[in-house]
Amino acid sequence: MSAEKLRGCSLLRNCHDAMRVEQQVLKGLLEHSPDALYLDIGCNDGQVTMARATEIGTKSVFGVDYLVDRIRAAKDKGLTVLEADADHWFPFKDEAFDVITATQLIEDLDEPDEFLRETKRILKPSGYAVLTTNNLAGLHYRVELLMGRQPRCMSPSEFTHGLAEDGTYCGHTSLFTYGHLKEVILMHGFRIEKSGTHTLYPLPVAASESITKIFPSLGAYSYYKVRK
């Protein structure tokens, strides 16, 4: 196996580990609320959405996505799913939801400010939203830049770097540092209840957890629990 393929396999393995850590982080942020109306923006096929709904304890589960096959798969799992572009207006009334999640989404949007405005509009005054994304200032990105390399998942070209989980190449559109996205969230009138980062490539999970608690700006992925 070539060095590039080995590097790709290692990245995929690390990504899978990071997503498992993220699911644990979300479990600590989601509140048990059986009567909550829950919306997952970018619900994909609905599998992860339904797992989060179980954590919340609600059966009132809604989703938004833009790919027909994903929407069909999510509906088969019991979600009420609407086709919509997260860069623009959401097809919901004001203050409609108690809980909103949007995980690993904002980095792929062309209009992150519009997304935040719409999320605030459809969130109930007593509700909360949980957002996660890549951290532009993550330690592995800093190291790659120091080496003169284009960081993975930051290339605007489909032909270079950015190996995704399915083996395709990608480049995110709107990457924020952990600290800067905090500032932007506050500018949109949200109150940040809890935030942090997780995962330090290529360190093991236990070491990453200890370091990111002290130096949150270094984690690979950022998370925020926010209220109006």
Image: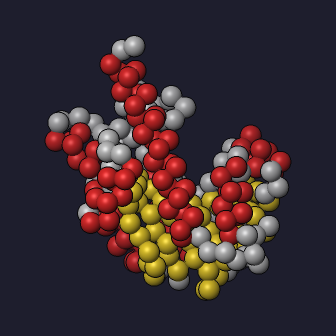
Position of residue 198 in the picture relative to residue 164 (left or right): left
Residue at position x 82%, y 55% in the image: 78
The number of callouts visible is: 0
> In which quadrant will I find the N terminus?
top left
Residue 136 in sight in this render: no
Q: Position of residue 133 (x, y in %)?
A: 45, 56
| Residue at 45%, 48% in the rendered image | 18
Q: Residue furthest top?
A: 1
Q: Is residue 204 above or below residue 31?
A: above
Query: Residue at 35% of width from left, 73% of height from top?
Result: 183
Residue 89 or residue 62, whichever sits in front = 62
Identify which residue, 191 or 88, lies in the foreground: 191
Where residue 47 sits in the image (x, y, percent)? 70, 49
Q: Residue furthest bottom?
A: 125
Residue 198 visible to the viewer: yes
Q: Position of residue 63 (x, y in %)?
A: 71, 59
Report the coloring of the rendering: secondary structure
Does residue 151 appear to the left or right of 85 in the view shown? left
Q: Is residue 166 above or below residue 87?
A: above
Residue 102, quarter of the rendered image: bottom right
Q: Report which quarter residue 160 is drawn in.
A: top left
184 vs 73: above or below? below
112 on left or right of 65: left
Classify 137 as above or below 155. Answer: below
Q: Which residue is drawn at the image coordinates 50% and 62% (left, top)?
A: 25
Q: Is residue 105 left or right of residue 57?
A: left
Q: What residue occupies the far front of the structure in this picture?
A: 206
Residue 166: percent from left, percent from top: 55, 32
